[in-house]
Image (tube, helix red, strand yellow):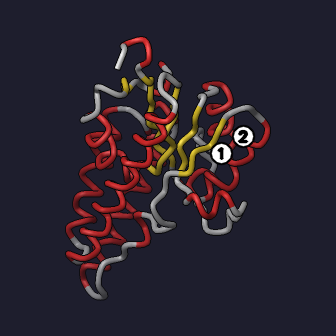
Amino acid sequence: MNATNLTRLAVLGTLSDLHREPIAYDLACLRSLVVDLAPDLLCAEITREAWEDSDLSGAALEVREALAPVVKATDIVLVPVAPSPQQFTDFEGPPGWRRDLVSTFDRALRWGQRRADRPEAINGTLFELFCHAVCELTEMTWTKEDRTTWEAQNDVLAENILEAVQRDEGRRVLVAVQCQRLHRLLPRLRAHADLLEIVDYQEL
């Protein structure tokens, strides 16, 4: 690909229902951030079927109350990339001590999210390392089938993003996904340096 057609892509971690809490990175902040960045394409965690049917009932809070309203009010094009409505928190682990551990790790992650507070911190190196560690521990409590499903989901998610990039080369692309996906998604995208340049969201 010609360097001039290389797609600039940023991945923005989101916080699901924590965006409703009194933190700096609330729904209004998320909406304002996306408006200010004004990407050509916004890849979001909603399935194609749900988006085409205008059915946001099963979508995450940030899609329903931040991303979709911004798209409706601007020229930004939303690309649905979720392989299924299932999210990280839907994997609870089998009943018993492992499910108790999932609850403990979830509380730890929420503590870290609240402490990070701001979008630049949530998408910074320190929180990324913290989130990665907590999510890895959480995933270890899941069944083998759940871990396989989660990996397959992230494979398809990355493939859907790459298809959008290839369909419309040279665009500015913002990928908004819940922060638990970042450590799975970024390596998959970085393997395609021939198609895209990954930048911090502030540099998009």
Instruction: Determine whether, in the image, residue 115 is placed left or right of residue 33.
Output: left
Q: Which residue is mark 2?
A: 70
* Outermost residue toward the top in this view: 4
The spot of residue 67 in percent (x, y) is: 65, 45
* Outermost residue toward the right in this view: 73
- For the residue pair 3 and 11, the one nearer the viewer reads as 3
- For the residue pair 77 and 108, the one nearer the viewer reads as 77
CA distance for labels 2 and 1: 5 Å
Residue displayed at 48% across by 40% down: 164
The spot of residue 179 in percent (x, y) is: 42, 48
Amino acid identity at mark 1: Leu
Look at the picture and state if 190 lies above or below 15. Answer: above
Amino acid identity at mark 2: Val
The spot of residue 70 in percent (x, y) is: 72, 40
Give neighbour class at mark 2: few <14, some 14-19, many 20+ (Cα, 10 Å).
many
Residue displayed at 70% across by 63% down: 53
Residue displayed at 43% across by 72% down: 90
Q: Which residue is mark 1?
A: 67
* Kind of element beneath mark 1: helix
Residue displayed at 67% across by 68% down: 57
